[in-house]
């Protein structure tokens, strides 16, 4: 409100959006604008308020996890490490092998269903609060603000000619951005290479070619997306922005301008009591436009560019408070609530509706299945491959023998001794060594000879079952089917 | 390039490729429309679903430039890599060379490990768990197809886990067998022995292993064995490892021990070949495999 450039800035904002031009030139002009207009740089004004605090809370939460997690240790190893070369994926107490990718599938289903549920309830909550694009943009804008100053100062700086001071400020900003971006790239690679070793390698400039590439590439992507691309990623690159509307319904709470209450808009003196003049509640200060990170005017209604960050709610609530008007001229509201004039309680009651209940039920179901599957997961996998070149062979005493290769995958970080037993045919038994020692988190392949009594069964192919059991832990047991040939 | 019988096809491919690439660039350039600033854009004139229309806008610049970049990329690629007929490209890259480079790299990494084991005695290797683990991997990869995963063989493929060795069980001899291969030939004796003679000899051979046999046939077969078979299998039938002639007295039958099997062996002969691995595995790996095979045979049978 005390912005010396306030009025000028609003005019510029409107001009930037081409609002006036578009209104008069018809739809052709508008189509061209969306596709061909060069990007007009957006200078979002800083805003404080409830939703801004929520966003920062989520920035802190997600980034503490992202930057901090690789540094945590679990017993003698990194707590979360995706060892691609060894194909072992350490997550806290678990070691996942490529055979366990089904758990990742469950995780992705949970992520997708959560997205559906949250979007159906509160619109683009993911975009506005948790998406890395939003989170890193928020961090980069904070750096920008600390170095270049507020919105008006940034605009003045960009409009002014190049000078030693401008160069110094810009260099400082980009330096800080690049530092954060490189640290982000380093942290990312730290999920795949033990981060403490990686730090040593970075310090002595001896990272491997792929590590170097990914640190620089991920760093560059962070710098480019959060520093330069910003809202363009959401508007032009992100597919989610385009299919979000499929998840909305008339009861989805989205950032909404209450046109019935706000119009007709116009400036007025603060001395006029609320509701006394002919004007609606919107004082047309333009702050909602100035704070918008995608440069739209929420008063035009729901637009695909809106990432649901609620910065305009924070801004408008401040203005309403200064005028001693009730807040919430721009608020989270639903189409139904606006149409029927529902209050907050009535609107929130509609959160529980068929769509969200179904999403929620499936979500809880998948989560329960995943939790159960992880709890019951047996840290032993067994593969049996019959020797293809040989059929049955007759050994001493006329017993019939088949040969297999058995692969024992001990996925636990403890060594185990396993006993191999066969069942399914009369007199069946393991003739080769039946006890095998497998070191921690290792695979061992051993030949397996299975014999049956002579004449015990007809010629042909028979199903047998091989059971592998850890001697020191009765819960670790795996059964695998195999074929026994008799000729 | 020997793939073609005449130079014509080299030129055919090279010219066609270059013309196609350049043609793409020319087509792109000819079809490029630029929008004059402020000019009105029409729709394509088609209307779907009552009011759905399509702007006839030119291709965005970034997109057009991507096309040009692919054209430039392909020309640069063809300058460096093979692709234009018989032209090999300035980098001289080839699949064979890449394969050889990778093998060379692997040899540099793993060579020292094998060299260390190649210098060790068989006795020591058999007691070295790491060496035996590598030996087992090599065995499972290259030998198990015929001799089975447990080294106990199959019909026609000798059992390596017992005490019977067709060519000798000394580890040095096993290594020799692996390196140079073996060719064992039992010549067909059907013509020399006649149908009855074959049966007689079969019964004699069965008697050598203490199996049930017809004593009249055994007596007749014994004489024929002494004149025909003893040259390789020895007068007492204990075989001769130098020739790969198996011991016929130990109840181990490579091609089956029934009367019918033995008759078939005598009648038609047998040929058994162990391929030579010198060229593929080389000296050091063969040393390790020999130690593993020897250790399997020396293990007390379970």
Image (tube, rainbow, N blue to C red):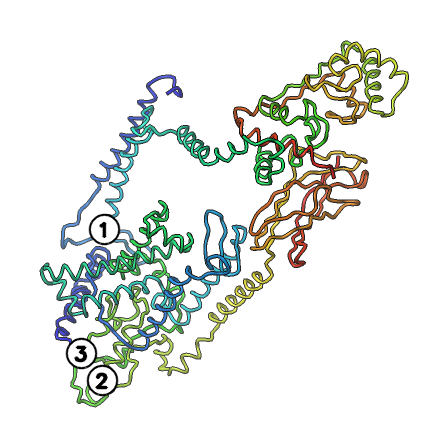
Residue B100 versus residue B11: which sits nearer the camera?
Answer: B100
Q: Secondary structure at mark 3?
A: loop
Foreground disc of the pair 1, 2: 2
Distance Cα–Cα, label 1 vs label 3 = 42 Å
Residue denoted by label 2: A322
Distance Cα–Cα, label 1 vs label 2 = 48 Å
Could you tell me which residue is drawn at 25 percent across and 33 percent down?
A: B23
The percent coordinates of residue A356 (x first, y second) are 46, 71
Q: Secondary structure at mark 2?
A: helix
Residue B124 versus residue B56: which sits nearer the camera?
Answer: B124
Task: Please say if A318 is above or below A57.
Answer: below
Residue denoted by label 3: A1
Left-right relation of B238 to A361: right
Chain of the residue where label 3 is placed in the rendered structure = A
Chain of the residue where label 2 is placed in the rendered structure = A
Distance Cα–Cα, label 3 vs label 2 = 10 Å
In this view, the residue farthest toward the right is: B216
Could you tell me which residue is drawn at 52 percent across and 33 percent down?
A: B116
Q: Earlier in the sequence, mark 3 or mark 2?
A: 3
The percent coordinates of residue B184 (x first, y second) are 67, 19
The percent coordinates of residue A486 (x first, y second) are 75, 37
Residue denoted by label 1: B57
């Amino acid at each position: 409100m005390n912005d010396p450039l306030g009025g000028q800035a609003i005019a510029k904002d409107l001009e930037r959006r081409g609002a006036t031009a578009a209104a008069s030139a018809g739809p052709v002009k508008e189509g061209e604008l969306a596709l061909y207009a060069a990007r007009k740089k957006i200078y979002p004004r800083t805003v404080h308020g409830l939703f801004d605090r929520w966003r920062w809370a989520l920035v802190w939460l997600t980034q503490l996890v992202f930057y901090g997690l690789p540094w945590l240790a679990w017993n003698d190893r990194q707590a979360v490490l995706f060892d691609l070369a060894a194909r072992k994926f350490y997550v806290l107490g678990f070691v996942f092998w490529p055979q366990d990718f089904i758990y990742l599938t469950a995780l992705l289903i949970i992520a997708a269903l959560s997205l559906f549920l949250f979007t159906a309830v509160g619109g683009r909550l993911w975009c506005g609060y948790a998406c890395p694009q939003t989170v890193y943009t928020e961090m980069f804008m904070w750096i920008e603000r600390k170095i270049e100053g507020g919105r008006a100062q940034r605009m003045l700086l960009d409009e002014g000619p190049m000078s030693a001071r401008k160069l110094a400020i810009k260099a400082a900003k980009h330096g800080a951005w690049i530092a954060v971006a490189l640290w982000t790239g380093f942290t990312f690679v730290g999920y795949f290479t033990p981060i403490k070793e990686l730090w040593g390698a970075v310090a002595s400039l001896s990272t491997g070619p792929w590590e170097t590439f990914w640190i620089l590439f991920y760093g560059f992507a962070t710098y480019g997306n959060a520093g330069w691309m910003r809202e363009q990623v959401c508007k032009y690159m992100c597919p989610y922005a385009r299919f979000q509307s499929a998840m909305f319904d008339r009861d989805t709470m989205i950032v909404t301008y209450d046109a019935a209450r706000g119009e007709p808009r116009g400036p007025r003196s603060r001395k006029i009591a609320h509701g006394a003049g002919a004007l609606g509640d919107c004082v047309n200060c333009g702050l909602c436009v100035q704070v918008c990170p995608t440069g739209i005017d929420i008063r035009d209604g729901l637009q695909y560019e809106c990432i649901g960050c609620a910065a305009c709610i924070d801004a408008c609530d401040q203005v309403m408070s200064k005028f001693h008007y009730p807040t919430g001229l721009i608020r989270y509201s639903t189409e139904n609530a606006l149409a029927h004039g529902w209050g907050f309680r009535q609107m929130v009651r509609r959160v529980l509706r068929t769509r969200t209940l179904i999403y929620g039920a499936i979500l809880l179901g998948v989560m329960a299945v995943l939790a159960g599957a992880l709890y019951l997961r047996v840290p032993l996998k067994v593969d049996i491959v019959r020797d293809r070149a040989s059929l049955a062979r007759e050994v001493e005493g006329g017993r019939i023998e088949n040969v297999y290769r058995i692969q024992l995958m001990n996925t636990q970080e403890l060594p185990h001794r396993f006993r191999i037993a066969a069942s399914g045919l009369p007199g069946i038994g393991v003739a080769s060594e039946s006890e095998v020692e497998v070191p921690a988190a290792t695979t061992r392949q051993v030949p397996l000879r299975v014999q049956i009594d002579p004449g015990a069964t007809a010629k042909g192919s028979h199903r047998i079952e091989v059971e592998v059991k850890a001697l020191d832990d009765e819960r670790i047991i795996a059964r695998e089917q195999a074929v026994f040939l008799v000729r | 390039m020997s793939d073609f019988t005449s130079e014509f096809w080299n030129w055919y491919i090279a010219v066609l490729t270059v013309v196609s690439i350049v043609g793409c660039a020319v087509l792109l350039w000819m079809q490029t429309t630029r929008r004059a600033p402020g000019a009105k854009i029409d729709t394509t004139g088609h209307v779907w679903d009552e009011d759905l229309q399509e702007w006839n806008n030119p291709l965005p610049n970034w997109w057009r430039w991507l096309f040009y970049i692919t054209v430039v990329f392909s020309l640069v690629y063809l300058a460096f890599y093979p692709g234009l007929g018989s032209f090999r490209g300035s980098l001289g890259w080839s699949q064979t060379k890449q394969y050889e480079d990778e093998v060379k790299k692997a040899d540099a990494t793993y060579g020292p490990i094998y060299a260390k084991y190649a210098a060790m005695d068989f006795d020591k290797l058999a007691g070295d768990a790491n060496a035996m683990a590598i030996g087992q991997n090599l065995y499972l990869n290259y030998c198990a197809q015929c001799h089975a995963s447990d080294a106990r063989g199959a019909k026609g493929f000798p059992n390596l886990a017992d005490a019977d060795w067709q060519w000798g069980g000394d580890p040095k001899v096993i290594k020799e067998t692996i390196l140079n291969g073996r060719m064992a030939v039992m010549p067909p004796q059907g013509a020399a022995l006649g149908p009855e003679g074959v049966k007689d000899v079969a019964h004699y051979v069965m008697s050598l292993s203490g199996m049930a046999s017809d004593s009249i046939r055994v007596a007749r077969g014994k004489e024929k064995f002494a004149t025909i078979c003893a040259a390789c299998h020895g007068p007492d039938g204990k075989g001769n490892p130098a020739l790969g002639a198996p011991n016929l007295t130990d109840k181990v039958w490579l091609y089956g021990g029934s009367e019918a099997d033995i008759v078939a062996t005598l009648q038609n002969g047998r040929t058994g070949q162990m391929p030579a691995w010198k060229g593929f595995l080389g000296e050091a790996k063969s040393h390790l495999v020999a130690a593993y095979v020897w250790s399997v045979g020396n293990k007390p049978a379970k």
